[in-house]
């Protein structure tokens, strides 16, 4: 009988040990795996915040915006302010800015129309506007963000200052999201 009690006690002790010790072993292993997974996620988050933010910025820069128009809506009798508004909207196709409102395709036809209007004008800013338009006519957009900020400052802008120029792929996405297929084809044929 004493042996049965001792054997039962040993078995009971072993079961209790396995139950609590086993759970601790399993919990420690699960906890270890969980900690490793969390460390991996945190490591990726630390490595990728710029990449993740860049994706958000890219989407923001190329997203559909309001105020898109195809007709420039100006002519020889238009004011300097109206012409600057059109030129400002044209730059939105190419620049990065926190906020953009309005876009007009920056294609040879619209550039030439605006150039002709400015050339015939007596605008106070005529020389500056012609210099900008002359660059655009030549396909030179290397300073388009500065051109945007010239218009933005002239108009008293407080939100949406340009901080860079979109990449070719960003511009293509912007065009596809904001302009019709004819404009997208025209822009892609210019490259």
Image (cartoon, grey):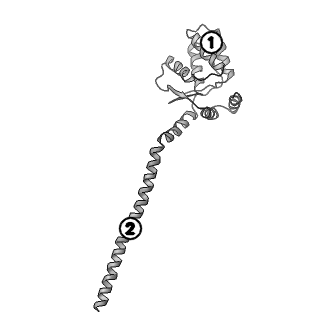
Label for residue 169?
Answer: none
Horizontal and vertical percent position of residue 133: 62, 17
Horizontal and vertical percent position of residue 131: 60, 14
Which residue is located at x 45 percent, y 48 percent?
Answer: 43
Q: Residue beneath label 1, please?
A: 118
Where is residue 1, by image quadrant? bottom left
Residue that sits furthest to the left in the current view: 2
Horizontal and vertical percent position of residue 92: 57, 27
Question: As drawn, is 48 to the left or to the right of 115?
Answer: left
Q: Residue beneath label 2, please?
A: 25
Which residue is located at x 41 percent, y 60 percent?
Answer: 32
Is residue 36 visible in the rendered structure shown here? Answer: yes
Label 2 CA crowd tier, 10 Å (few <14, some 14–19, many 20+): few
Give whichever of 9, 71 is nearer the camera: 9
Quadrant in the picture for the C terminus:
top right
Residue that sits furthest to the top in the current view: 122
Relative to residue 4, is residue 73 depicted above or below? above
């Amino acid at each position: 009988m004493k042996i049965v009690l001792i054997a039962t006690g040993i078995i009971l002790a072993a079961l209790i040990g396995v139950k609590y010790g086993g759970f601790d072993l399993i919990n420690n292993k699960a906890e270890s795996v969980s900690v490793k997974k969390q460390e991996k996620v945190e490591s990726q988050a630390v490595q990728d915040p710029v990449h993740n933010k860049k994706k958000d910025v890219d989407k923001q820069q190329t997203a559909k915006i309001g105020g898109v128009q195809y007709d420039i809506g100006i002519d020889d009798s238009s004011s300097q302010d109206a012409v600057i508004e059109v030129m400002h909207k044209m730059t939105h196709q190419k620049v990065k800015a926190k906020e953009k409102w309005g876009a007009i395709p920056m294609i040879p036809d619209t550039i030439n129309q605006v150039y002709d209007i400015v050339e015939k004008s007596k605008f106070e800013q005529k020389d500056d506007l012609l210099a900008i338009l002359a660059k655009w006519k030549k396909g030179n957009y290397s300073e388009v963000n500065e051109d945007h900020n010239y218009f933005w400052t002239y108009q008293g802008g407080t939100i949406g200052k340009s901080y860079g120029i979109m990449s070719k792929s960003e511009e293509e996405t912007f065009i596809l999201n904001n302009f019709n297929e004819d404009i997208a084809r025209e822009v892609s044929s210019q490259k």
